[in-house]
Image (tube, rainbow, N blue to C red):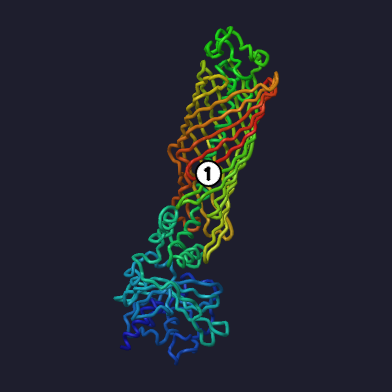
Amino acid sequence: MHLLKTLRRTCLLLALVATTLGPPALAQTGPLPPGIVVVGPVARGRTFPIGERGVAYPSVTNGIDANNYLGSLVTPTTLSFVNSASSGASAVMTTAPTQYIRFYAPGSSSQQGAFLVGSNQIRGMSAAQIRDFLALPFMPTMMTIVQLPAGTCLLVGTAGPIAGWGRGGAVQEYLIGKSTDGGCSSGVPAFTGTFINGQSIPSGALLYGPRAGGGNAASVAGALDRGPYPALYSGMDSLYNALDVVNYGDPSQLQFALRQLDGEVHVTTQSVLLGDSLYIREALLGRMRQASFTASSQSGGSALATGGPVLAYANAPDQGSATRRSDYGPGFDGKQDPALAETAPTPDIERRTTFWMQGVGAWGTNQGNSNVAGTYRSLGGFLAGVDRQITPNWFAGLAGGYTNSSVSVGDRLSASNIASAHVGGYTGASFGDLNVRAGLAASFNTVTSNRSIVFPGFADSLNAKYTSTTTQMFGEVGYGVAAGRIAAEPFAGLAFAHLDTAGFSESGTPGIAALTSSGNSVSVGFSTLGLRAATNFALTDSMTLSPRLSAAWQHAYGTVAPTATLSFAANGASFTTTALPMAQDSLLLQAGVSLLLNRQVALDVAYLGQLAYGIQDTWLTGRVSLRF
């Protein structure tokens, strides 16, 4: 009976001690907890029998000392210990809180006990593997987290193999306790820590994946479970320790913590940049639509020209118009409509260069889903361009501008700011009532991000700065028609956008959960099918008001939910994070009004809305055009 009791105690020692047979052990080489190595006497605490309790051992500097310190708790002369003289041992008084795992089996040992091990040494192991690694004489069935305050005295050593029990090799701790005199050399140290989250040992101890759910949380959990595991007492080890505590009870606590680690703001920013390519595309297409109808003599088309000639003064058919004689109604004499004669000057082909500038403000929300948090984003800036009418039916131009936008992911305590410089070229041609428009654009983005991670037992603040480039090509075909005073154009368009994001490394305070990226590339295509209509009202001989409406269906192809591979800087564990998806199908609505002040100057304001399930974007623009 006495032997069985001794076996139980010794198995929990986890081979901390070295046998008294053989040469002395070397100094402790394993990782030590943050603290002060005790030089001199080390008191025995309340875990010892009454006769040894409070009696100090002269000094612990090696495995032999550790064995002698434990005294009657081990009997190396009667047990089959293998010589582990090369292992060292030390007594340490901690200067910061520490956390460990204790394994036990009801009936053989209890939840509260002195023999402990660091979590990342046994993470992912089965009960059988734990028994082998810790050289236990029985199969452990339970585990508990042990949290110790600063000022706790610990005996630290490396387990040696025990014949028939296991190979050993773990750096382990024996909990001496905390003495009332504030040291480790006198008094009777007592346990002051907490033993929490007692639970059965799963197939893989302390793994997060089984309780992480799905999506980004599961991706982060998989990376942490695979490792490599950080060194004991390192910053990354403290992150694992905090996750271990919330990996108990309601799994939503663990999932909440894992989602904060996923770096979602970086990938969602990429999704936003691809979606925002619409703003640049629409600005250039808007100018091309204006130029198409201003320069051409299409039926009623001037109503569609933002700042173009006054309503429906299209040239007569003998001047190259596609307008049918019947479009003008009874009494048409083959020249201009008499009702508009005073306010419809013939376009001056010599006035072939136009300078324009457009201010833009936009904001929108995406409600998110069960995997990715919702976002709020805003954008402001300007675009300017110049184009030239090369022939009566063909024009080309260049444009550039600057925008600044922000992305807020409130549920992840994350945000990014994007400063973008834009350049582009565009061209268009008219073939009778058929209009063809095309353009290229590039946006050079500088992204500044910040995010906070806060969950029980852990806090971090991180930031990064990096660049990305958005390139896109797009085209549109429209056909202008007229019905009375209404001009209309059914249209269809295609666009392709590509985003290259440079690599980056986060930094912060303390920066434990910082992420790195080697860069990312993602592409998406868009098709658009819609109808726009407009009319004109002559206010004076030289001033015309032109309201317009447009509705279109936009469909996105390819990667509507970008993904990126991110890695923890501390240990290199990598995972894939999925972004908030762009709208697969959306309704684009536009309403605007232009005011032609004279033949050279036009003003325009417009609203553009993008509506989709869970997504709402609003865009307001103001533009001035100077023609000379």
Image location (x, y in percent) of residue 35: 54, 74
Residue 603 in view of the camera: yes
Image location (x, y in percent) of residue 580: 48, 47
Q: Looking at the figure, which quarter contains the N terminus?
A: bottom left
Q: Dot 1, how many residues are within 10 Å of its Cα: few (below 14), some (14-19), or many (20+)?
A: some
Q: Could you say which is closer to the camera, residue 523 or residue 277?
A: 277
Residue drawn 47% across the image and 58% down it: 258
Label 1 SS: loop
- Seen in the picture, residue 277 relative to 517 is either above or below; the reply is above
Q: Kindly give the residue lying farthest to the left in the view shown.
A: 164
Q: Could you say which is closer to the camera, residue 463 or residue 62?
A: 463
Q: Could you say which is closer to the camera, residue 49 or residue 387?
A: 387
Read off the residue under disc 1. 502
Q: Could you say which is closer to the camera, residue 294 or residue 383?
A: 294
Q: Looking at the figure, which quarter contains the C terminus?
A: top right
Image location (x, y in percent) of residue 266: 52, 48
